[in-house]
Amino acid sequence: MASSIPKPPSALNCQSYVGLRPPQRTFNFCLPQAATKSFPSRLFVVRASDSDFEAAVVAGKIPQAPPVPPKPAAPVGTPVVPSLPLHRRPRRNRKSPAMRSAFQETSISPANFVYPLFIHEGEEDTPIGAMPGCYRLGWRHGLVEEVAKARDVGVNSIVLFPKIPDALKSPTGDEAYNENGLVPRTIRLLKDKYPDLIIYTDVALDPYSSDGHDGIVRED
């Protein structure tokens, strides 16, 4: 390995770099102070013995950090984005321990999962034929029990998908604005029991639309 490492040119003024000892051998790093056409700026590595290494530490030869090159200028015509006049930093994803656990990026854990739950107006849990193993939960009992099981294993975020009775559906999905509808009632029930529960809702109109579309369908 030593034979493949070039020696620094004598014309360059190098300074001994001292670092921690790796398990095998120790190296000194020489950084050229000036570059010429014959010897462009580069990093040279030279093998050193343990005794030389210890002598450098005793002598106090602390290496200087290499200079940081300046950032390149932006192209001509690049718009300047002014800073926002904020008196406080917006940290809406950090306002509570539950939100921080849901959005932190350091690891993947049950706190990062969002559990989709299907609900309906009935009291019994009914199987969904097109989704084997999945059920529409009764919003009063079955849903609350399922949320409790999820929280026991660390899942504290859910998203609700409602099954609205056909009689309440319309071309404009007006039931979505009902404050006493299935989803608002369910949210109030869950928040009363689990205040720190994170609840997502589906904003598409297909559960409320008689046409089955995600939005409003008009003739024009």
Image (cartoon, rainbow, N blue to C red):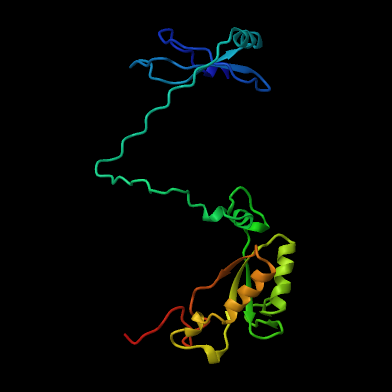
Q: Residue at x 48, y 79 (%)?
A: 205
Q: Nearer the viewer, residue 34 or 103?
A: 103
Q: Quadrant of residue 121?
A: bottom right
Q: Position of residue 132 (x, y in %)?
A: 67, 77
Q: Quadrant of residue 190?
A: bottom right
Whether residue 23 sits left or right of residue 65 in the image: it is right
**Residue 33 visible in the snapshot:** yes
Whether residue 6 sits left or right of residue 164 in the image: it is left
For this orientation, the residue located farthest to the front is: 87
- In the rendered view of the protein, which quadrant contains the C terminus? bottom left
- In the rendered view of the protein, which quadrant contains the N terminus? top right
- Vertical arrangement, residue 220 with respect to residue 52, above or below: below
**Residue 206 visible in the snapshot:** no
Q: Nearer the viewer, residue 99 or 154?
A: 99
- Vertical arrangement, residue 53 with respect to residue 194, above or below: above
For this orientation, the residue located farthest to the bottom is: 167
Q: Position of residue 15 (x, y in %)?
A: 49, 12
